[in-house]
Amino acid sequence: MAVIINSATINNLNGFVIKVEVEIFKGLPSFTIVGLADQSIKESKERIRAAIVNSGFKFPLGRIVINLAPANLKKIGSLLDLPMSIGILISSGQIEAEHVEDYLIAGELSLSGDIKEIKGLFPILEAGIDGGFNKFIIPRENSYQSSFFYKGDIFDFDELKGVINYLTYKDQLPSEKIPFKINKVSSEDLSEIIGQESVLRAAEIAAAGFHNISFYGPPGAGKTLIANKIANILPEMSYEEAAEIFKIYSTTDISEEMFKNVRRPFRNPHHSCTSATLIGGGIGKVGEVTLAHNGVLFLDEFLQFNKECINQLREPLENREVQISRLNNNVKLPANFMLITAFNPCPCGWNLSFSKDCMCSDLEKKRYLSKLSKPILDRIDIFTYVPRVDISKRNIKNQKALSKKIIKNIKSATEIQTIRYQNEKVKHNANVKSKDIMRLFNVDNEALDKLEAIYDKFNLSMRGYYKILKISRTIADLSGEEALKASHIYEALSYRKFIDGEVI
């Protein structure tokens, strides 16, 4: 009778529980793995053979057949080394492991029998919990991730012999959980920004409502500095948001940095990146838009990006997810990020500046801005000009006081949104669906009348109409006002004007 070991595999960001069925028949020695296994699993035969021998056991003679069920699901990765080895040792009668069926087991083996770190631990653990498992055996090298997973009992090991001893004697306690703690927002994060009160106001609104924002202005005005600071003043994450991020990052090569420094992601790809890097593509690769999920995607020198890259942002900005075609499959990946862009208003950078004359012709300016299509502009909530400031007006004391006030306001506005959306699928004003705005935003009649007049005067799109309402709702939340009023509409309107003065 076949020995069955429970394990899992991952496909994109999703985990799937599988059965590792092991049986050893009489006959000429052979080792066969069936069940739609990828190349890395087929190569595991020699790793398993060496790991078993180097752990002090005998590799059994006979015809070894391992079936990975269900057979219609593609099995990916080397994480099945450990469950297959345990299945072989049990099937050959070299060890006894009572209640092994209660565990979900995953791990890669080295030739010496050491258990190596695996990718995709969080999706695997989630799949196990959903599949009714409460006990997990994983690599010790993954413990920095598993300590943040609060469901079930997790047992981590660094070698095959340790797992076998535990399954035989049950002589180890589950690993300890680390209390969920993220880096706190510091009031010092904005104190480096000199002057720029109007720009900081726009940044405050963007951070409080998770609004996309574009900074444009001359070189050296501080656009990049302000964008970096916004990432540090965003509302603190809930555990649910962090778990979504952990799930993504556990499948990458940069997971350790995120788990050891828990905060909202801040992704800053270079303007020379390809669309596959930005959006995602290839086997097992997520794009920057997914790595920025629940955090910030900062595109510095925005107009230096390839036009194709810029236009491909339309889908994730609209749907908060990205759909990628891979090997005849359409894969949907999360991409709920706050977009921050920074760019010069013209090729020389001095258009709109009072400190230096612009040297660009009208044709050069038009060609330069042509990368920003109307659909992309429609999807950016806030536009704000960043002027050069007079350094002599620097006042550190006032700047620190303003910084503390901004962070306090953002925290209050976040608490208001948490209550407002406690029974909704969204968490921020910027993400509210158009059909739900009137139900959730408490817009007074005067504000609606003013907005309708603005809509007609500036020939706005419906997306632009709703953007003004969303920004206005955040402004009202920052003021602690329940009703959305005309004054909030007018301030929101000021953030919808682009370089040429057009209201988007």
Image: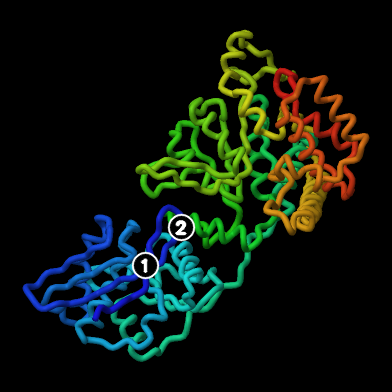
Question: Which corner quadrant holds the C terminus?
Answer: top right
Give residue 502's position: percent from left, percent from top. Answer: 74, 20
Side (left or right) of 409 relative to 285: right
Question: Which corner quadrant holds the N terminus?
Answer: bottom left
Q: Nearer the viewer, residue 163 or 105?
A: 105
Within 10 Å of disc 2 (Cα), the crowding (few <14, some 14-19, many 20+) is some
Q: Nearer the viewer, residue 407 or 332?
A: 332
Side (left or right) of 250 relative to 201: left
Give residue 197's position: percent from left, percent from top. Answer: 80, 37
The residue type indicated by label 2 comes to Asn
Residue 28: in sight, yes or no? yes
Identified at 57% across, 47% down, the residue is 266
Residue that numbered label 2 is attached to: 14
Residue that numbered label 1 is attached to: 18
Residue 355: in sight, yes or no? no
Give residue 8's position: percent from left, percent from top. Answer: 38, 66
Give residue 258's position: percent from left, percent from top. Answer: 52, 57
Tell me if residue 484 comes above or below residue 480 in the rendering. above
Labels 1 and 2 touching (C-beta < 8 A): no
Identified at 43% across, 60% down, the residue is 120
Disc 1 vs disc 2: which is toward the camera?
Answer: 1
Identified at 50% across, 39% down, the residue is 269
Identified at 79% across, 54% down, the residue is 420
